[in-house]
Image (tube, grey):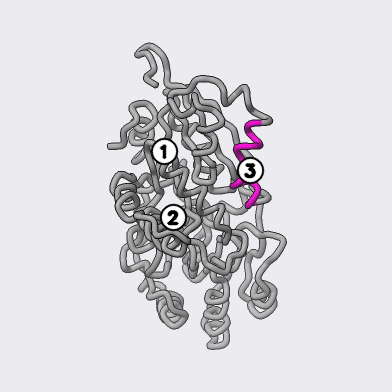
Amino acid sequence: MNAPLNRRKRVLLLSAYDAVSHRYWADSVIRHVESVEWTQLRLPARHFLWRVRGNPLTWLFKEHETLSRPYDVVLVTSMVDLATLIGLFPSLGQAHKIIYFHENQFAYPASEAQHSSVESKMVNLYAALAADTVIFNTAYNRDSFVDGARAFLKKMPENLPAVKPLEALRKRARVLPVPIMPLDGRHHGQRHPRRILWNHRWEFDKNPEDFFEVLFELSDQGVAFELTVVGQRFRHVPPIFAEAEQRLASHITAWGPLPEGRYRAELDKAGIVVSTTWHEFQGLAIMEAAQRGARPLVPDRLCFPALYPKAYRYDGTRGGLYDQLYRWLTTPTDQPEPLNTAQWEWPAWQAAYSSLLTEGVLD
């Protein structure tokens, strides 16, 4: 559906599970692409399996009028059941349909029960095949989606000839990161080169065990460091956090979720920000800390090799993390220079997003 030259494109944004990273992306896209007419529908980030499978029903019963309007572009996140929505609202199929993958259900750790359903994987796959344009935030996300879908379909009862269609999807998919907001100015407050920051979700897939076990060893060896543990906490917290709060009490400067202003202040003070995760598609928390001057130390796996130079990566093992942290803490002059994050910020990507939503192309 092509808009007349004198009319702004009408864009419908749908987010079926408006978690923190999804909300951050949606808010910033709307803020930075002002040349279109936005309509948006979002669903709260709770009841994961129902949200992924039931979002077409929720919107059908609650937002029928909104979804029945004409749009030029339909922009959806990966948890939206786009294929079903097109069936329920055929007019949406006439718009240019763009799906944005912050994550994909094929690459979650196998033991994470909430993401283990066949239904969530099939919603991802059907939506990608139904979209006109498929966008991933990193090449790792794209490749783990395609490779994961191939492995998944091999386990299904029928021997489907899926290789060519999936490889065609890989080829036509584009990579467009979630940009981070540029800083208004440099960080405020004094940075502490021996202050270690953890600012991730307090969940098992972020692998807090490796992180804290290394800190236990450093502490037992008498290595001087400070520790700030913030980030999003949920009802069920891995037991290692309670143990760490006790064993590392003398090192702790902040512990637990903080209001936004205090959280940013802690980022400004951190010298090193660490990831030990088993699961990451882009890692906004690490990016934001690095933007504010903390030296990132990330495992040599997942999305990280494409985003971080070798000086900021370790081999992904506890031993490798211990060795790198020991060097950086005992000889802070060995720490690399702050990472230049301009390539991750909105000014570098605003034109690409505008082109995607107004012209339907991505340069």
User: Is residue 140 at all visible to an observer of this figure?
Assistant: no
Which residue is under mark 2? 282
**Secondary-structure class at tag 3:** helix
Which residue is under mark 1? 131
Along the line of sight, the residue nearer the viewer: 29 or 278: 278
Is 198 displayed left or right of 3 in the figure? right
Which residue is under mark 3? 54
Q: How would you rate the neighbour count of disc 3 (Cα within 10 Å): few for under 14, some for 14-19, many for 20 or more?
A: some
On the image, which quarter does residue 235 sit in? Answer: bottom right
Residue name at image x 46 percent, y 41 percent: 184
| Residue 192: x %, y % from top left | 50, 65
Quadrant the N terminus occupies: top left
Amino acid at pointer 3: Gly
Residue name at image x 43 percent, y 44 percent: 128
- Name which of mark 3 and mark 1 comes first in the sequence: 3
Residue name at image x 49 percent, y 67 percent: 277
The part of the chain drawn in magenta is 48-60
On the image, which quarter does residue 59 sit in? Answer: top right
Is 313 displayed left or right of 84 in the figure? left
Q: Does residue 117 sit above or below 64 in this rendering?
A: below
Q: Are marks 3 and 1 in contact (CB under 8 Å)?
A: no
Amino acid at pointer 2: Gln
Along the line of sight, the residue nearer the viewer: 19 or 52: 52
